[in-house]
Amino acid sequence: MIKMQKRSLLLSLIALMAIGVIGVGTEKLVVYTYSSFASWGAAPFIEEAFEKKHDVDVQFVATGDARMMLTKLLTEREAGRPGADVFVGVGSVDLSMARGEDLFVPLTGEDIPNLASVREDLLIDPTNSLIPYEHSYVTLVYDSQVLAVEDVPLTFEQLLDPKYKKMLILEDPRTSSVGLAFLLWTIHQYGDPGYLDYWRKLLPNVLTITQGWSAAYDLFLAREAPIVVSFSTDTAYSVIEEGSARYKVMLLNSQGYRSIYLMGIVKGTKQQGLCKELLDFVLSPEVQERISTTEWMFPANRKTLLPVLFYQNAVFPPDPVMVPAERIGENLDRWLLEWAGIIVGG
């Protein structure tokens, strides 16, 4: 009787293995990304859909904003144990750092067929070690239930007005790509070292500086302050998800800081084939058509059609700005140290 039970159990195990229930031999793909992408962005759909197409367990890991995760990857690489196969979310503001550290595998159109459909102006890495999957513009966003249209600052100088005391929520440029974009925007506007004087004047109007965008936006939604550094697509989110245009975009000096978000294959991975398949899948129409209403960004694939409400309510700044990657690479460490000195010293 015992032998029969053992034989029955063995046959059951074999059957389960055959249909993949146990998953023996299933490969694992670890993807580092940022918290919003993993929690309510495109990651859940990508994970489920890609796992259906391939015998693989996709694991998205996000313990903070994109800059924090990139620092984590760099620290692991220096220790000889990189924990990721793929990274999704390198901001264009961090392109110089990522390229300088030689973290990612160069790619070609043969590796990623859908790369041919990506807008050419988004291809900012000549080696294609990092390829774009979405883009947007960092701007200020305000709560129209707190600030009337006539009270909204239209320029960087107007933002310094004492009437906006403690009304602004910012992100730390040392840990947040959104925060870094805003810092670079002020550098573009006021020059170096002129930006330092601007930040000294701006500080009285800052309520708090958070580590990442998610924390900042949560405070904004909780009405802790009526102005936050965010994206030019936030009104589209407000209209589509909440049925109102309560959260509106503020274009200082008619500008926005252009932000391109990139992904790449981590050097040292043993899963290059699957990694290439994953990146190509993210650029496919199946995923790209979901970028606008999960990531609330503009898709990189130029063939992607935008939902009507998104297109009608997303804001395209008339005069977007972007600091060249080479200049960022040459000066970023100093800029961040100087910025921190202003924040600490006041």
Image (cartoon, rainbow, N blue to C red):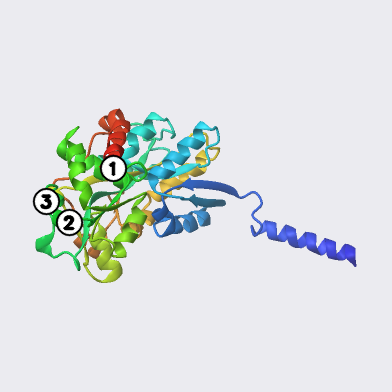
Q: Earlier in the sequence, mark 2 or mark 1?
A: 2
> Would residue 114 be found to the left or right of residue 259 on screen?
right
> Would residue 292 be found to the left or right of residue 32 on screen?
left
Which residue type carries mark 2? Tyr
Distance between the Cα atoms at labels 3 and 2?
A: 9 Å
Residue located 45% across and 58% down the image: 44
**Secondary structure of residue under mark 3:** helix
Q: Is residue 306 visible in the rendered structure shown here?
A: yes
Residue 158 is marked as: 3
**Secondary structure of residue under mark 2:** helix
Residue located 22% across and 45% down the image: 257
Which residue type carries mark 1? Ile
**Secondary structure of residue under mark 1:** helix
Q: Residue tagged by mark 1? A: 343
Q: Earlier in the sequence, mark 3 or mark 1?
A: 3
Front label number (3 vs 1):
1
Residue 100 location, quadrant: top left
State the residue in front, 113 or 267.
Answer: 267
Distance between the Cα atoms at labels 3 and 1?
A: 20 Å
Outermost residue to the left = 150
Which residue type carries mark 3? Gln
Residue 164 is marked as: 2
> Would residue 37 be found to the left or right of residue 48 on screen?
left
